[in-house]
Amino acid sequence: QVQVVESGGGSVQAGGSLRLSCTASGLNVGRLDVGWFRQVPGKERQGVSCIVATLVTNYADSVMGRFTIDRDRAKNTVYLQMNSLQPEDTGLYYCAARPWDSAHCLDSTTYRAWGQGTQVTVSS
């Protein structure tokens, strides 16, 4: 059974950077699609970025050019490097994993393994 745990959230000022980590167990990230999703109170969970087993990556338009997703198979971890953070990036960030799937990797309904979330707060 695949499980994931997030870490790396925190509070920063606008323009700052954070790196989130998603460590998997039960299957190597080389065989998983991993997505990052953001939840803000009162709004639907939004796909931020994802990386599939074949290393194809996707980004939400709002983070394109600022966020980078990559993985380390030896550490069984997927990272989300977030630069030039803005207040609108604030939210609870969840990592999710699934065995490789042809469905778009920002479709949250296709994931079964979710982490507990890590809070990112960006102040102006």
Image: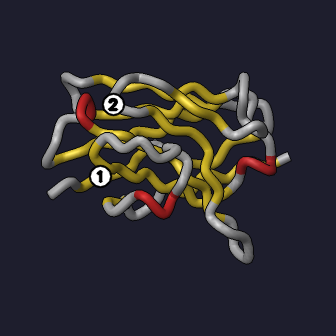
- In this image, 4 relative to 80: left or right? left
- In this image, 77 relative to 88: left or right? left
Which of the numbered marks, if any, corresponds to residue 108?
Answer: none
- Real-space Cα separation, disc 1 to disc 2, in angstroms: 16 Å
* 48 vs 28: above or below: below
Identified at 58% across, 32% down, the residue is: 58
Identified at 57% across, 39% down, the residue is: 49
Query: Which x, y percent locates residue 37?
Result: 55, 53
| Residue closer to the observer: 21 or 38 | 38
Which of the numbered marks, if any, corresponds to residue 53?
Answer: 2
Number of dots carrying numbers: 2
Identified at 47% across, 47% down, the residue is: 103
Q: Amino acid at mark 2?
A: Ala
Q: Which secondary structure, mark 2?
A: loop
Location of residue 39 by image quarter: bottom right
Residue receiving disc 1: 4
Q: Amino acid at mark 1?
A: Val
- In this image, 58 relative to 32: left or right? right
The residue sitting at the front extreme is: 102
Q: Badges 1 and 2: C-beta atoms under 8 Å apart?
A: no
Residue density around tag 2, few if under 14, some if 14–19, many if 20 or more, within 10 Å: some
Query: Mark 1 or mark 2, which is nearer to you?
Result: 2
Query: Which x, y percent locates residue 67?
Result: 63, 29
